[in-house]
Image: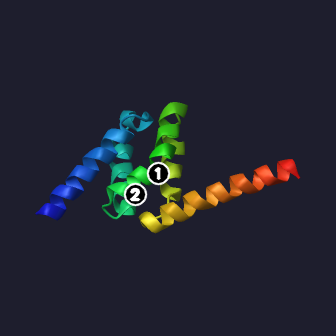
Amino acid sequence: EYDQRHRDDLRLYIRHLLELTNLKDSPTDLYSATEILLTKSENKFVYISAIREELDLLISNNDSIEIIMQYIDKLPTGLYGSYDRYFNQIINKLNNQVHIFS
């Protein structure tokens, strides 16, 4: 029962975040995106926290439903994958800065 309540709480949190995007205009896509993120998160709030900055960009950019769904589809599954992706982005940014100053 605890696991189901935890999963339901996480689903509500994900849905709340996605309702701040243009997905709010498409209940089918909103439901689908919520379930995809719930699966990719492996039921961990920390996964959603790890991708929260990127979700906030989707919100502030007012991105289309298609762009949001493409972003969600490209997200890695699990916490390890999200951190790996995050650190690779940092490394790429640092490498680009080094090339600018060389």
Q: Position of residue 51 (x, y in %)?
A: 46, 51
85 left or right of 79?
A: right
Res 47 label: 2
Q: Is residue 57 above or below residue 97?
A: above
| Pick the front one: 63 or 101 | 101
Q: On the image, numbered disc 1 is attached to which residue?
A: 51
Disc 2, SS? helix
Q: Residue at x 31, y 39 (%)?
A: 16
Disc 1, SS? helix
Q: Residue at x 47, y 52 (%)?
A: 72
Residue 67, quarter of the rendered image: top right
Q: Position of residue 97 (x, y in %)?
A: 77, 50
99 left or right of 82?
A: right
Residue 26, quarter of the rendered image: top left
Q: What distance separates the C-alpha of mark 1 from that of mark 2?
A: 7 Å
Q: Position of residue 4 (x, y in %)?
A: 17, 61
Disc 1 residue crowd, few under 14, some 14–19, many 20+, Cα 10 Å: some
The number of numbered discs placed on residues in the rendered structure image is: 2
Q: Residue at x 52, y 38 (%)?
A: 57
The quarter in which the N terminus is drawn is: bottom left
Disc 2 residue crowd, few under 14, some 14–19, many 20+, Cα 10 Å: many
| Pick the front one: 31 or 20 | 20
Asked if the residue at tag 2 contacts the one at tag 1, i.e. Cβ–Cβ closer than 8 Å, the answer is yes
Looking at the picture, which amino acid does disc 1 mark? Ile
Looking at the picture, which amino acid does disc 2 mark? Tyr
86 left or right of 38?
A: right
Q: Residue at x 49, y 66 (%)?
A: 81
